Amino acid sequence: MDMIILPSLLAADFGRLDEECRRAAASGADELHLDIMDAHFVPNLSFGPDVVAMARRAVPGLRRNVHLMITHPRKYAPRFIENGATTVQIHIESADDAAATLAEIRGKKVRCGLVLKPATPAESVFALLPQVDEVLVMTVEPGYGGQSFMAGMLPKIAALRREALRQNLPALTVMVDGGIGTETAAQCAAHGANAFVAGTSLFKLPDMAAGVAAMRKAAAAVYGKNLK
């Protein structure tokens, strides 16, 4: 299982976002993660589709993983896809029908994913796993960067990986986001996560490449250890 590292643009220097995108690409990151907040589904505002387009121009070869923290993702997902999203994630808790929204995203020939808030049980997405490429477990409350990792989410990560294997979906990406650094990435990997969104812990480093490499190595060393 490949370990996938996604620097989160929410923690970048907003005064030079194009340079920060290029720094993430040069660090060996696999994808760029963009948090889209509408100040309704979560209590904060962040980016719009134009920032996704900027990232596409800055580093065309780096995939753009777009996390829609918005009330009506079905209405807005097409705009983000048109502007360069290569994966679109929606919340299972959003107001729109998840299955229909995922089908429309996949119909645009991009990857799709589901996201769970901390209070949402893993079982809420089990029936939809065959329709998605990835599931993101929030390990903080969505809406703001720089929060502390919630270790209570580790059993949820393991439950999702076990269910994916039970459904014969070994390639499903199980992603985590929130308080992720080298140590917490390893904890999540041991419970079955293989993709790690990291904002502050990577963008604060003078040598992001070293941070990406260390996180990937630490996660790979213990992947699945606590699933047995």
Image (cartoon, rainbow, N blue to C red):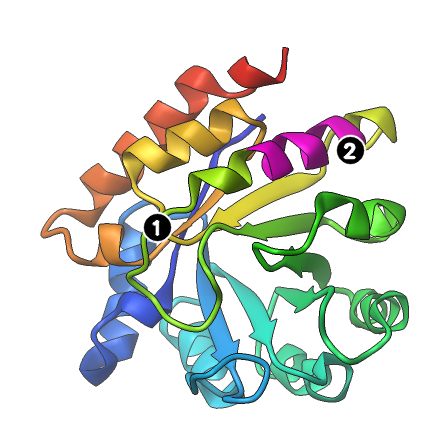
Above or below residue 26? Residue 88 is below
Above or below residue 28? Residue 60 is below
* Quadrant into which the N terminus falls: top right
Examine the rendering and report whether any part of residue 194 can be seen: no
Location of residue 227 (image quadrant): top right
The residue tagged with tag 1: helix, strand or loop? loop
Q: Residue at x 53, y 87 (%)?
A: 38
Above or below residue 150? Residue 158 is above
Q: Amino acid at mark 1?
A: Gly
Q: Residue at x 36, y 73 (%)?
A: 58
Query: How crowded is the residue under tag 1: few (<14 C-alpha within 10 Å), some, or many (20+)?
Result: many
Of the pair 155 and 162, the residue shown nearer to us: 155
Residue that mark 1 sits on: 179
Of the pair 159 and 199, the residue shown nearer to us: 159
Would you say residue 156 sits in the magenta stretch?
yes
Q: Are marks 1 and 2 in contact (CB under 8 Å)?
A: no
Residue that mark 2 sits on: 164
Examine the rendering and report whether any part of residue 37 can be seen: yes
* Quadrant into which the C terminus falls: top right
Q: Tell me which segment is drawn in magenta.
A: 155-163
The residue tagged with tag 2: helix, strand or loop? helix
Q: Residue at x 49, y 23 (%)?
A: 190
Left or right, 193 with reference to 164 = left
